[in-house]
Amino acid sequence: MNKNKIKNLEKVARRLHQAINDEENIYVCSDSDVDGVGAAIIFKETVQYFNGEIKDYFLPDREQGGYGLNPVALDFFLQKEPGLLFY
């Protein structure tokens, strides 16, 4: 894969590296379908590989809030005060 084809990939990698080094609170919001859960697990393992920690996850209930980053998810994360939120 050509890293130049993914917009802002290096910027995201630098920001994640900084968050891990600074021991920021890292949180993940993902869809609750197979690819969303799979992506969250791969991301968690990647962060752990670099000695980081995911503090918590949010997988929205499709019937209550729909897909993705919704008002329920935002309320959840506002209470947590994340240093970095990946969606």
Image (cartoon, grey):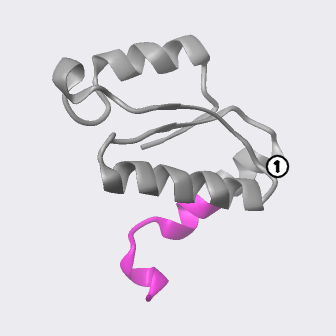
In the displayed structure, would residue 36 be above or below residue 71? below
Which of 77 and 60 lies nearest the eye of the viewer? 60
Q: In the rendered picture of this protein, how many numbered marks are placed on residues?
A: 1
**Residue 36 image offset from top left, x and y in percent:** 36, 50
Question: Going 54% across and 59% down the picture, which residue do you hit?
Answer: 42
User: Which corner quadrant of the image does residue 79 belong to?
Assistant: top right
Which quarter of the figure is the C terminus placed in?
top left
Give the residue type at disc 1. Asn
**Residue 80 image offset from top left, x and y in percent:** 59, 17
Which quarter of the figure is the N terminus placed in?
bottom left
Q: Is residue 13 magenta?
A: yes
Which of 37 and 50 lies nearest the eye of the viewer? 37
**Taking 76 as reference, is 45 left or right?**
right
**Residue 13 image offset from top left, x and y in percent:** 61, 62
In the displayed structure, would residue 57 be above or below residue 15? above
Disc 1 target residue = 21
Question: Going 82% across and 49% down the picture, which residue do you hit?
Answer: 21
Magenta: main secondary structure equals: helix
Question: Going 64% across and 31% down the picture, which residue do you hit?
Answer: 83
Dot 1 falls on a residue whose secondary structure is helix
**Taking 53 as reference, is 33 left or right?**
left
**Residue 29 image offset from top left, x and y in percent:** 44, 37
Q: Is residue 62 magenta?
A: no
Outermost residue, front direction?
A: 34
Q: Residues within 10 Å of mark 1 (few under 14, many from 20)?
A: few
**Taking 22 as reference, is 78 left or right?**
left
Question: Going 28% across and 36% down the picture, which residue do you hit?
Answer: 68
In the displayed structure, would residue 9 be above or below residue 60? below
User: Which corner quadrant of the image does residue 32 belong to?
Assistant: top left
Outermost residue, bottom direction?
A: 2
* Residues in magenta, as a range: 1-14
